[in-house]
Image: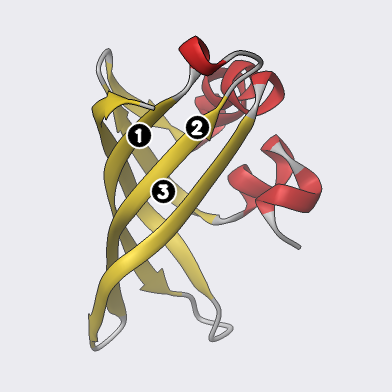
């Protein structure tokens, strides 16, 4: 199920067991992703859309744009992101690495 439907649980479930995020404060291991993302995902709506993707073997990538809509217009922002995916032994694709960079206020 999607992050939109499941919130932070859906976000975390998209990550491989050894997947991680890079935030301004540094590397966020999978075990800490829920704690880092919960405040954001419960404060508004995060929407994203890939603009490019590709794959080579069992690795893939998506790059795109994201928009956060908060409780007020001042809480909103836009960003760009990159996600590296790895195919799992069961054939599913999970996030190995994810990061984003705010590009401007919304």
Residue 37 image position (x, y, % from top left): 55, 26
For the C terminus, give its image quadrant.
Answer: top left
User: Which of the two discs, 3 and 1, labels the residue nearer the N terminus?
Assistant: 3
Name the residue rendered at 57%, 56% in the picture: 14
Q: Nearer the viewer, mark 2 or mark 3?
A: 2
The quadrant holding residue 61 is: bottom left
Which residue position is annotated with label 3?
19
User: Label 1's element?
Assistant: strand
Residue 69 image position (x, y, % from top left): 56, 29
Is residue 14 toward the left or the right of residue 83 in the image?
right
Name the residue rendered at 70%, 58% in the picture: 2
- Above or below: residue 101 compared with residue 97: above
Residue 61 visible in image: no
User: Label 2's element?
Assistant: strand
Which residue position is annotated with label 1?
78
Q: Are marks 2 and 1 in contact (CB under 8 Å)?
A: yes
Name the residue rendered at 79%, 47% in the picture: 6
Q: Residues within 10 Å of mark 1 (few under 14, many from 20)?
A: some
Q: How is the image coloured?
A: secondary structure
- Above or below: residue 41 compared with residue 62: above
Q: Residues within 10 Å of mark 3 (few under 14, many from 20)?
A: many
The quadrant holding residue 90 is: bottom right
The quadrant holding residue 80 is: top left
Cα–Cα gap, marks 2 and 1 = 6 Å
- Above or below: residue 93 compared with residue 41: below
Q: Which numbered marker is on residue 68?
A: 2
For the N terminus, give its image quadrant.
Answer: bottom right
């Amino acid at each position: 199920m999607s992050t939109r439907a499941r919130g932070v649980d859906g976000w975390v479930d998209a990550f491989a067991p050894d997947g991680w995020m890079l935030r301004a404060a540094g590397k966020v291991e999978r075990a800490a992703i829920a704690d880092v993302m919960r405040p954001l995902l419960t404060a508004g709506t995060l929407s994203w859309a890939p603009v490019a993707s590709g794959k080579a073997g069992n690795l893939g990538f998506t790059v795109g744009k994201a928009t956060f809509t908060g409780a007020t217009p001042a809480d909103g922002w836009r960003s760009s992101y990159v996600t590296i995916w790895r195919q799992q032994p069961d054939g599913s694709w999970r996030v190995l690495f994810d990061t984003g960079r705010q590009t401007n206020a919304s």
